[in-house]
Image (cartoon, rainbow, N blue to C red):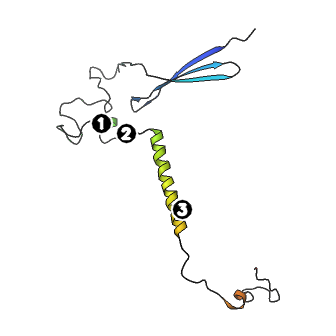
């Protein structure tokens, strides 16, 4: 009789600055070998009511840098007067850190391109480098071998 296979399913969710990333659904089948399946699943929409916010409106998460720069009463902060402020305004306003919407593959390709071009440039400089026009200094008496502490009777010039 064969052993019965057990199946374990786990869901992993992550969020980064209130922007939900794709959920990875992992299914594991454990037997002699392990089979792993990854699948992108959209996270469920959950309307969480904050008990500390009271009757203040639950505003959507919107970065102020994503708004158009013109057409606001307060041009600098990109908002109109009287507009309700989000409870996480210090994260969403124009003075917070910038959002980088670049994929890892694109960033890695840009870095590799930069270092490849830098290497090609350094190789070209090394190949086109010429010798110094000055002549190296020469000393008499076998390069002052005896005067610099060499043995007088040893005529081996490899030292």
In the figure, residue 9 lies in which quadrant?
top right
- Circles 1 and 3, Cβ within 8 Å, touching? The answer is no
The correct choice, above or below, for 106 with respect to 33 in the image is below
Residue at mark 3: 123
Mark 2 to mark 3 CA distance (whole Å): 36 Å
Mark 1 to mark 3 CA distance (whole Å): 43 Å
The correct choice, above or below, for 140 with respect to 133 in the image is below
Image location (x, y in percent) of residue 52: 34, 22
Q: Earlier in the sequence, mark 2 or mark 3?
A: 2
Secondary structure under badge 3?
A: helix
Number of numbered callouts drawn: 3
Instruction: In the displayed orientation, state which residue is furthest to the bottom.
Output: 140
Discs 1/3, front = 3
Discs 2/3, front = 3
**Neighbourhood count class around disc 2 (C-alpha, 10 Å): few under 14, some 14–19, many 20 upward:** few
Q: Earlier in the sequence, mark 1 or mark 3?
A: 1
Q: Earlier in the sequence, mark 1 or mark 2?
A: 1
Residue at mark 2: 99
């Amino acid at each position: 009789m064969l052993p019965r296979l057990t199946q374990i399913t786990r869901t992993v969710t992550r969020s980064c600055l209130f922007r939900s990333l794709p959920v990875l659904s992992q299914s594991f089948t454990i037997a002699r070998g392990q089979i792993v399946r990854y699948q992108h699943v959209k996270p469920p929409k959950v309307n969480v009511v904050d008990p500390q916010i009271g009757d203040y409106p639950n505003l959507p998460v919107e970065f102020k840098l994503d708004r158009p720069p013109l057409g606001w009463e307060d041009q600098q902060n990109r908002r109109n007067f009287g507009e309700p402020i989000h409870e996480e305004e210090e994260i969403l306003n124009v003075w917070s850190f910038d959002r980088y919407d670049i994929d890892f593959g694109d960033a890695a390709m840009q870095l590799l391109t930069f270092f490849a071009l830098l290497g090609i440039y350094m190789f070209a400089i090394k190949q086109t480098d010429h010798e110094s026009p000055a002549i190296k200094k020469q000393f008499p008496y076998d390069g002052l071998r005896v005067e610099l502490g060499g043995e007088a009777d040893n005529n081996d010039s490899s030292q």
